């Protein structure tokens, strides 16, 4: 059984991932959401540099696999 989720913060936290801004709400501190977004952005940029692809979906999938590993 999953734990109850924390209530989402009232104000969204703006983050930028791979050049796009997202306004996220979460149960954690805004700084934590920013750290997560920074990690995703970093991995996506690494993948894009190594593969040379501009396809955002492919970059996101490969970055997600990299993070999961």
Image (cartoon, rainbow, N blue to C red):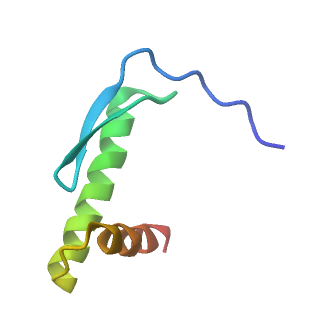
- 27 in relation to 67, above or below: above
**What residue is drawn where x is 77% and y is 42%?**
2
Left or right: where 57 falls relative to 5: left
Q: Count numbered badges in the picture.
A: 0
| Image x and y of residue 49, in percent | 15, 77
Rendering quarter of residue 25: top left
Left or right: where 16 falls relative to 9: left
| Image x and y of residue 54, in percent | 18, 74
**What residue is drawn where x is 84% and y is 43%?**
1
Rendering quarter of residue 5: top right
Seen from this angle, which residue lies furthest right?
1
- 51 in relation to 9, above or below: below
- 32 in relation to 65, above or below: above
- 44 in relation to 41, above or below: below
| Image x and y of residue 31, in percent | 32, 32
**What residue is drawn where x is 35% and y is 24%?**
12
Seen from this angle, which residue lies furthest top?
10
| Image x and y of residue 22, in percent | 30, 39
**What residue is drawn where x is 34% and y is 68%?**
57
């Amino acid at each position: 059984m999953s734990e109850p989720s924390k209530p989402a913060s009232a104000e969204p936290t703006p983050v930028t991932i791979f050049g796009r801004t997202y306004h996220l709400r979460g149960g954690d501190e805004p700084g934590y959401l920013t750290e997560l977004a920074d990690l995703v952005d970093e991995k996506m940029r690494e993948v894009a540099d190594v593969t040379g692809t501009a396809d955002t979906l492919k970059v996101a999938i490969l970055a997600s696999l990299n993070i999961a590993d």
